[in-house]
Every structure is written in structure tokens, then in C-alpha cells.
Image (cartoon, rainbow, N blue to C red):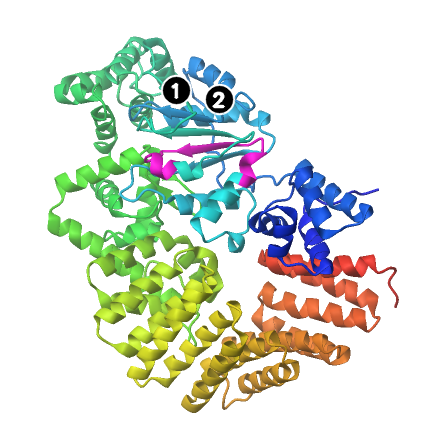
């Protein structure tokens, strides 16, 4: 007999609560379990609560013994089969084949820092160049089979001008732990609680590399539990309590020489001679036993067959200042970097220096080309040279990144070798390209579409899919450029970029930064002294605050502020959008009467202005508010009006907006018809919605009418068809990574299966 699935607890608990007619708050009060904890269980964030918690919930719900046992079994299943880590996210970097030395440190991590050894946080700290990251990655690969739930690696970019924010770091870790992007909490405290909960009972190793300071690190560390965290940092991080610390010393002479011998083992050519072993020992001594300096020196020998180890040692020895710095703190690394830098072509040196201006964590060939006069193909060739020499790290999809210390070195060379005017011009060219490309990409999702042409340089934005990929991949870079433009007072530029993101933001609401984008554009519009423009961008901010941050009351206040600005500007369209957003905020705040009134006023304003995009959206909002208020027939009629508006040529918006709107309206009408128990009519509405799927092609938009059709078919006793259609809906919601809709669909499927055999 098959037992309950590990994700069975949430739907089961929610079903029992609904049958009991209890709200979350009522169940929390009756059971003594917090409403947040119950909500986490129902949403699937908490799949395996303790038995005493489940027993308290069962008692509060008044469950018979059979149902209480089922709830306990579902909780046990959630503990028995925890989420595994997601491949491809926060993966360990590859092990180093020619790794040498560090046997003592590896053994220490095996015994003190391994799973179950406790404490659960180990900090590896010390001067740059000691090989902290390489050490922990190598140890992790050796211990990987001891961590049944996987190993994760995240670079916190502690030496960047803007280290990775804990909120963004938590997003990456949570996605690697299996949380879908659209289900990430937007509240920082809730995101931390979810992270601690997910890792608490996992046998997982998490490596947090290059931590900036205690403030960045604390939100990422676990509380109690079985997980293991290793942290590397230049700083001692003495403020972190309950952590064991490892400070690797420089490699002893024998181990340092062995590392050089391993790196250069396959080197052939005129540069090899009988004195090589002794000369390698000299090089090792001159590098101060620092693994990073040793590796760069070894790579120089490999890439220059004509050099001998003796000549390399002589070069190091001849540069007295460089040798002094090589053995004194951070400056030891600078000399090793200089050895690589001196081997570069003039083109590669310029690109290397200017890449230090990139604000994001990585970059593409197109972005690198924007910093120089080079073509993308030349950039790819030069980037390969930099990667080969160890000055850049290779990433996925032709992207590359700096090691933090190399970035600092590159920036020093930039300051030394290029004038302030040259540096400012290069950064301005980069920001201009980023913001121009962001505007062009965003326009693909506007009613008029993009103005992209085939000969546009550097990046291919030939369709909406490529535009969306670029906007997501380069988000850290164009977002940084936008903030820089705002700080520089480029108000019109900020407004234009944010405007181009208006419709795209609906597709990526979980990004986590839309409220900042639109707050910047709202401030810029205010600075321009244009009330109509300020109303527009206050409306965008209202949307972000409700849809991205989940704060309907604040959203409604912003929308009403925008409405007043729109009236001052005599702009009925923006006033209508304001009322539309205010209505959603009112509905989500439980003010249904106000919501219906505001939505109805929005519809009238859009109609009077003849706005083809806004009018059907306001009608959808009105219909949803009418249904929430229990006015079902009015809601169904309003959905019909929306469909008619987007179907008639004289009132239809842009085709891609019309198709999505019609599909949503028909799915909404089907739900109302189900409420009215008009099964045949609901089935027909779903069929009309599904006919549009071929043009819309969005899994979430197909899943909703598929689920409503399944419910209608079941009520019509067409059970085999109903089961096929609910499976289609489940597949759609799984592909869309929408846990909210997937929970509803799996609940519908369970009710179907629990009601007995199917009929024809």
C-alpha cells in the first residue's frame, strides 16, 4: 500500500480546516499553534511538523481518530522525505585536479566541521591568497557523500562595492533548496524564517563564500538543527557566536613546491631544464607559500613554454618592492596578479581594467564590448585569454566573473593607467548601453511592441523570449545602472526605463526589486514637476507594493494619492488606473463595497477616455470584486462585457494583450458559473478560453480554465474526461511553478479520486 506523499500535509490540513469552518486565526487560537506556522504547513513550506503540533491541531479541529491518524502520517511523510537541493542552483564549483597540500586542514574539516560533529558553523578566515575557497570546496567534494541532502555554494561577494544583499542571498539559497521563485516571501523576516525552517532538519552542507561582515552573514545562518555551514571571509567575523574557526597558514615549502610541480607537470618545451625542481622551490619561497600566488606563477610557466623556472624566479627576485609586497598581507597577491597582467596583450589589459567597472556579479561578451571599442567576437577571444590566465572565472552561457581580489587589482590598474575622463566615459558608455537595451527589451511587452531591428549592435532582441532572457540575466547590471542614473539626477532617463518595464513586471513579479524601480521613477517624475507623470509612476508603485510586497493597505493609499495627482493633471486614464489599483487594494483588505465602487468608477473613466488597454483590465477587476462580494450574475455579465471589448476590432487592445485578457475573463466567468451550478455553461466558457491557448502559450493561463473545465465535467458526470483535464491543469501549474494554483488543482484531483470510480 502506498503511503502519503511528502507534500500531502498542506492540502489535507487545509481541507480539514475548511470542513470545520475555521479560519487560520481561529485554529491558531484553539490549538495554541501560531497562525504563521499553520499557514506554512498549508502552503507546503512546513511539511513535517512535530507530532505534538499535529495532535494539537487535530484536537482543535475535532477530528475523528481516523482523520487524526491521516494527518500524523502526512507529517511523518514530510519529515521522512525532505526536499532535495535543486541541481544547477548554488552548485559546488568543480574540484581542483592538481590540488596539493592542506592535508591537516582537510582532516580538521572532516572531523570538526563534518555532519553531525557540531557546532554547525565553521568560519575559515585569513589573509587574501591563502586558498580559503579552494580548501573548503575540495573538502566538500571529498565529503559530498556524507551529506544526503546535498552541498550548496554561494559567493556573497564580500569585497564588491555592493556585496550581495542578504535578501537576495536568501532568494538564491531558497531556490536551490526547492522553493519556486514566485513563492519566495518578499518580507525579509519571513524569508529568513523560511530559510531556517528548510535547512533545520536537512543533512546539507552550505558554503557561504567571501562574507563581507557579520551583518551580511547573520540572516543566512541556521538556528538549531542538523545542517552544516562553512563560511569563508577575509574578516575574522568575531561577532559570530558558536562557530569554530580555521585560519589556514601559508603552505610549507615542501607542499608549496609540490603544488607548483603538479601544475607544471605536463609542461614541455625549451623552458624545461635540469634545474627545474630547485628553481620551482625558489619560486615557491618567493610566493610566500600563498596558494593563489603559486597557482598564478605556475600558470605563467605553463602558458610561456620558453620561460624556465629559473628565469621566473629571477624575475621575481629582481623586483625588490614586489617581493616585499608578496610577503606582506594583501600586497602579496598584487605581485602575483601583476605577473599575469604583464603577459596580456594591450587589448586584454584594457578589457581587464574596464571590466572592474561592472557593478553586477558577472558579465556577458556584449556587456564587455560596451565598455570598449571591441566587437563581441573579439571580446570572446580576449575573455578566453583572461580565463586561461586565471584572471577571470568562466560561468554559464558565455558569461564570466572576477574573483573578488582580482577585481580590486583590476580597478587599481584602471586608476593607475587611465585618466578620470577615460574612466567616466567608459562607465557612461556601459550605463547608456544597459539602459538603452533594457528599454528596447521592455518594449516587447508594451502594447505597441518593440522597435528592435536586425542590425542593432551587441545583443539580439529579435523576439519577446530573447528580450525576457536578457532582462532577467542582466537584471543586476541594468538595475545598478538605473540606480546610478537616479543618483545622478537623470530623472527623464529613470522615468523612461521604468516606463518600459511596466508590462514586463507582470511577468516577473517575484524579482523582488520592482518596488525600488518604481519608487525611483516616481521620485524622478516628481522632480520633473509633472503631476500626470507622477500619477503614472505612483500607480506602478501601487501595483508593486500590493503584488510584490503583499501590502494592500499601503497600495491603496498610494493609488488614491495617484488619483489626486491625475485629477490635478486632468488625466482621466491615470485616474482610472489609480481607481483600478485602489479597488484591488480594497478587495484584498476586505473592503468589498469600496472595492466595487472604485472599480466601477474606473470602468466609467476608461470608457469615457476610449482607452483600449485599460478598459478591459478595469472590467476584469470589477468582475472579480463583484464575485468577491457575492454578486455572481453581475460578475458573469461583466466578464462577458470584457470579452466583447477585446474581441471587437474597434475596441480591442494590442493582440497579445487582448488574447490574455479574453482568456482570463472566460476563466473568471467559468468560476462564477460553477458558483451558480451552471455546469454546461461553465464548460462552454472553458472551451472558449482554451481555444486561445495556442496564441497565448502561457501555462498558468491554460491551467485555470483547464481546472474549471474539469470541475464542470465532474459535475456533469463525465468523470473520465474530468480526470484527464485535471491532470492537464496540474501539469500546467507545475510548469508555471505556481504553488497556489497547484495546491488548488491537486485538492480538486484528490476530491475527484476520493469520490469513487469513474464513469463514461
Q: For numbered disc 2, what is the local secondary structure?
A: loop
Residue lying at 29% horizontally and 41% vertically, measured from the top left: 160
Q: Quadrant of residue 551?
A: bottom left
Residue lying at 54% horizontally and 83% vertically, measured from the top left: 646
Instruction: Indicate which disc residue 246 carries.
Output: 1
Q: Nearer the viewer, residue 255 or 181?
A: 181
Marks 1 & 2, CB-CB < 8 Å contact: yes
Q: For numbered disc 1, what is the local secondary structure?
A: strand
Q: Nearer the viewer, residue 640 or 325?
A: 640
- Can residue 8 be spotted in the picture? no
Residue 54, relative to residue 708: is it above or below?
above
Residue 513 rendering spot, x and y as whole percentages: 39, 57
Give the residues in magenta.
197-217
Instruction: Indicate which disc residue 373 carries.
Output: none
Instruction: Indicate which disc residue 113 carries.
Output: 2
Quarter that holds the C terminus: bottom right
Q: Nearer the viewer, residue 648 or 393?
A: 648
Amino acid at each position: 500500500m502506498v503511503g502519503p506523499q511528502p507534500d500531502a500535509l498542506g492540502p489535507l490540513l487545509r481541507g480539514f480546516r475548511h470542513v470545520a469552518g475555521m479560519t487560520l486565526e481561529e485554529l491558531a487560537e484553539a490549538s495554541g499553534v501560531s497562525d504563521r506556522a499553520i499557514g506554512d504547513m498549508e502552503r507546503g513550506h512546513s511539511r513535517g511538523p512535530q507530532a505534538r503540533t499535529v495532535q494539537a491541531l487535530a484536537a482543535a479541529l475535532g477530528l475523528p481518530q481516523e482523520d487524526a491518524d491521516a494527518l500524523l502520517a502526512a507529517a511523518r511523510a514530510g519529515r521522512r522525505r525532505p526536499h532535495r537541493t535543486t541541481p544547477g542552483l548554488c552548485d559546488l564549483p568543480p574540484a581542483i585536479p592538481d590540488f596539493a597540500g592542506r592535508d591537516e586542514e582537510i582532516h580538521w574539516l572532516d572531523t570538526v566541521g563534518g555532519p553531525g560533529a557540531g557546532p554547525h558553523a565553521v568560519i575559515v578566515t585569513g589573509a587574501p591568497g591563502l586558498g580559503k575557497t579552494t580548501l573548503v570546496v575540495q573538502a566538500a567534494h571529498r565529503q559530498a557523500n556524507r551529506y544526503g541532502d546535498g552541498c550548496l555554494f554561494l559567493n556573497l561577494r564580500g569585497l564588491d562595492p555592493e556585496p550581495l544583499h542578504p535578501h537576495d542571498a536568501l532568494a538564491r539559497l531558497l531556490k536551490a533548496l526547492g522553493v519556486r521563485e514566485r513563492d519566495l516571501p518578499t518580507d525579509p523576516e519571513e524569508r529568513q524564517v523560511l530559510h531556517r525552517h528548510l535547512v533545520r532538519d536537512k543533512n546539507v552542507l552550505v558554503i557561504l563564500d567571501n562574507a563581507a561582515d557579520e551583518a551580511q552573514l547573520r540572516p543566512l545562518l541556521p538556528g538549531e538543527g542538523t545542517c552544516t555551514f562553512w563560511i569563508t571571509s577575509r574578516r575574522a567575523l568575531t561577532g559570530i557566536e558558536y562557530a569554530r574557526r580555521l585560519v589556514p597558514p601559508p603552505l610549507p615549502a615542501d607542499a608549496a613546491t609540490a603544488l607548483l610541480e603538479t601544475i607544471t607537470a605536463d609542461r614541455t618545451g625549451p623552458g624545461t631544464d635540469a634545474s627545474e625542481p630547485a628553481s620551482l622551490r625558489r619560486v615557491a619561497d618567493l610566493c610566500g607559500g600563498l596558494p593563489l600566488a603559486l597557482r598564478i606563477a605556475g600558470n605563467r610557466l605553463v602558458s610561456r613554454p620558453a620561460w624556465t623556472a629559473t628565469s621566473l624566479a629571477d624575475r621575481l627576485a629582481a623586483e625588490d618592492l614586489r617581493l616585499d609586497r608578496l610577503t606582506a598581507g594583501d600586497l602579496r597577491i598584487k605581485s602575483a596578479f601583476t605577473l599575469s597582467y604583464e603577459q596580456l596583450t594591450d587589448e586584454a589589459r584594457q578589457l581587464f581594467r574596464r571590466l572592474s567597472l561592472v557593478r553586477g556579479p558577472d558579465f556577458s561578451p556584449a556587456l564587455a564590448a560596451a565598455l570598449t571599442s571591441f566587437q563581441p567576437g573579439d571580446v570572446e577571444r580576449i575573455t578566453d585569454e583572461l580565463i586561461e590566465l586565471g584572471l577571470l572565472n568562466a560561468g554559464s552561457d558565455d558569461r564570466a566573473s572576477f574573483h573578488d581580489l582580482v577585481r580590486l587589482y583590476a580597478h587599481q590598474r584602471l586608476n593607475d593607467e587611465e585618466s578620470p575622463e577615460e574612466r567616466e566615459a567608459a562607465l557612461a558608455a556601459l550605463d547608456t548601453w544597459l539602459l538603452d537595451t533594457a528599454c528596447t527589451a521592455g518594449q516587447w511587452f508594451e502594447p505597441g511592441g518593440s522597435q528592435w531591428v536586425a542590425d542593432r549592435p551587441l545583443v539580439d532582441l529579435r523576439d519577446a523570449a530573447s528580450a525576457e532572457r536578457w532582462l532577467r540575466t542582466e537584471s543586476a547590471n541594468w538595475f545598478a545602472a538605473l540606480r546610478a542614473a537616479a543618483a545622478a539626477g537623470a530623472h527623464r532617463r529613470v522615468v523612461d526605463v521604468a516606463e518600459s518595464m511596466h508590462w514586463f513586471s507582470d511577468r516577473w513579479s517575484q524579482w523582488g526589486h520592482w518596488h525600488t524601480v518604481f519608487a525611483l521613477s516616481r521620485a524622478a517624475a516628481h522632480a520633473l514637476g509633472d503631476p500626470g507623470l507622477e500619477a503614472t509612476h505612483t500607480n506602478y508603485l501601487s501595483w508593486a507594493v500590493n503584488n510584490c510586497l503583499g501590502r494592500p493597505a499601503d497600495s491603496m493609499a498610494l493609488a488614491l494619492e495617484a488619483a489626486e495627482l491625475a485629477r490635478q493633471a486632468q488625466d482621466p486614464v491615470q485616474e482610472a488606473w489609480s481607481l483600478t489599483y485602489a479597488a484591488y487594494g480594497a478587495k484584498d483588505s476586505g473592503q468589498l463595497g469600496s472595492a466595487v465602487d472604485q472599480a466601477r468608477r474606473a470602468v466609467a473613466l476608461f470608457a469615457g477616455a476610449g482607452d483600449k488597454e485599460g478598459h478591459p483590465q478595469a472590467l476584469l477587476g470589477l468582475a472579480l470584486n463583484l464575485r468577491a462580494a457575492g454578486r455572481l450574475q453581475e460578475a458573469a455579465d461583466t466578464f462577458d462585457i470584457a470579452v466583447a471589448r477585446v474581441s471587437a476590432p474597434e475596441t480591442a487592445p494590442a493582440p497579445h494583450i487582448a488574447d490574455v485578457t479574453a482568456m482570463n475573463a472566460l476563466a473568471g466567468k467559468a468560476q462564477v458559473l460553477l458558483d451558480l451550478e451552471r455546469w454546461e455553461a461553465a464548460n462552454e466558457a472553458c472551451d472558449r478560453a482554451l481555444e486561445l491557448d495556442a496564441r497565448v502559450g502561457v501555462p498558468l493561463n491554460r491551467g485555470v480554465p483547464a481546472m474549471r473545465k474539469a470541475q464542470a465535467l465532474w459535475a456533469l458526470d463525465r468523470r473520465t474526461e474530468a480526470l484527464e483535464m485535471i491532470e492537464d491543469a496540474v501539469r500546467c501549474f507545475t510548469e508555471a511553478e505556481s504553488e497556489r494554483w497547484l495546491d488548488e488543482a491537486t485538492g480538486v484531483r484528490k476530491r475527484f479520486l476520493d469520490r469513487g470510480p469513474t464513469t463514461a
